[in-house]
Image (spheres, helix red, strand yellow):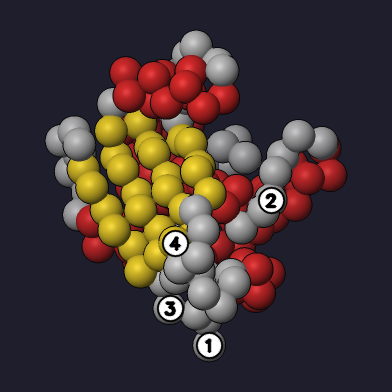
Amino acid sequence: MPALLTVDVEKAVRAPVPPSFVRDVLRSALQVPELSSRLAPAARGVAVRVTSDRELRRLNLAYAGEDHATDVLSFGGDGEHLGDLAISWPAVVRQAAQFGHSERTELALLCVHGLLHLLGWDHAATAERREMTRLTKAALRESGIRLAARRL
């Protein structure tokens, strides 16, 4: 049985997706044993902020030193708070159109991608990228979500 995860969702921009969708995706992702095994016993909370390109650019510059918007950023927490995710809704819309799947599918992908980073995965090397892709697809399957063939 996967660990219980508290997910707080804040929509700073209009996004036609209910917060319950984000909660369900992240909680379902923990059905994948590799993910649930990395969740520390005390780490039970994630905050997700669905926001603008402008805010993602500001956060990316402030915390990563990169002066451009990105689609998702992860910020590790401590104690009971696993961390925070910031997701650009305009990037969700653009990428969904680019890859030919729904905005919900793209949002789910970015939520899972961010969660994997919070749990310690990265994608700097080819082997890491392959593992993150495998885990992302497995986590999305737990929510019944299939990506467009060329998305990952």
Q: Closer to the N terminus: mark 1 or mark 2?
A: 1
For label 3, count other residues whose C-alpha is less than 10 Å away and answer few (under 14), some (14-19) or many (20+): some
Asked whether the viewer can see residue 6, the reply is yes
Q: Which residue is mark 4?
A: 81
Q: Give the percent coordinates (x, y) of residue 42.
A: 51, 74
Q: Give the percent coordinates (x, y) of residue 152.
A: 62, 40
Asked whether the viewer can see residue 147, the reply is no
Whether the residues at callouts 2 and 3 have beta carbons within 8 Å, the answer is: no
**Camera-nearest residue between 1 and 12:** 12
**Camera-nearest residue between 86 and 19:** 86
Which image quadrant is residue 41 in? bottom right
**Camera-nearest residue between 95 and 64:** 64
Q: Which residue is mark 3?
A: 4
Q: Which residue is mark 2?
A: 121
Check the image and report above or below for 87 versus 120: above
Kindly identify which numbered label has been placed on residue 1: 1
What residue is rendered at 45% in x and 68% in y? 80
Q: CA distance from mark 4 to mark 2?
A: 17 Å
Whether the residues at callouts 4 and 2 have beta carbons within 8 Å, the answer is: no
